[in-house]
Amino acid sequence: GSPLVHLSALFRIPLPLLECLATIALEHHRAIVQRNVGIIRDNLALFRAFLDARPARFTWVPPRAGPVAFVEPARVTDAERYCDAVLEQAGVLLLPGTVFDESSRAVRVGFGRRSFPDALARYAAYVDAA
């Protein structure tokens, strides 16, 4: 079936209501995209400043498009353990690069959420305390 039928079943939302919400979203797609691009742009600038303030602590390649990047923290050899520790101690979810067939030292950082500045502040405190 269609993606809307699957979403309707998954979230138990009546299909007519879901179709109405999808229509509204499509009618306002420019504003939605513009808002999301602004969030990503602002968050990426914050992350660049975070990394620039700690040049010996990380290596990375800035994203060319999209709201994610892979970062390699210095002295990390096991990204899975590192991500578990960050989640447990700072409450910040990073994903190990191995989930995406990337380096076992890399972690994936996403910039697409409005809560990113708060998560970055908690991550910065974790990194700076180490």
Image (tube, rainbow, N blue to C red):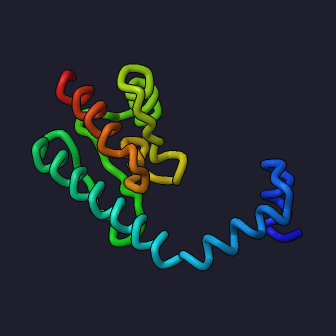
Quadrant of the drawing holding the C terminus: top left
User: Quick one: 105 or 47, which is closer to the camera?
Assistant: 47
Provide residue 34's location: percent of width, then percent of height.
40, 72
Residue 52 appears left or right of 29: left
Residue drawn 32% across the image and 49% down it: 71
Which residue is located at x 45 percent, y 53 percent? Answer: 102
- Residue found at x 22% / y 58%: 45
Q: Give percent across and percent down for residue 58.
A: 22, 44
Residue found at the very far right of the displayed protein: 1
Residue 6 in picture, x, y percent from top left? 83, 60
Q: Nearer the viewer, residue 16 or 1?
A: 16
Image quadrant for the N terminus? bottom right
Count all numbered tags in the image, as a single digit.
Answer: 0
Displayed quadrant of residue 27: bottom right
Measuring from the top left, give residue 128's x and y in whole percent. Answer: 17, 28
Task: Name the quadrant containing residue 29.
Answer: bottom right
- With respect to residue 41, does 115 lie above or below? above
Which of the 4 image quarters holds residue 89?
top left
Q: Residue at x 43, y 21 (%)?
A: 88
* Depth check, front residue: 20 or 101: 20
Along the line of sight, the residue nearer the viewer: 18 or 107? 18
104 vs 112: above or below: above
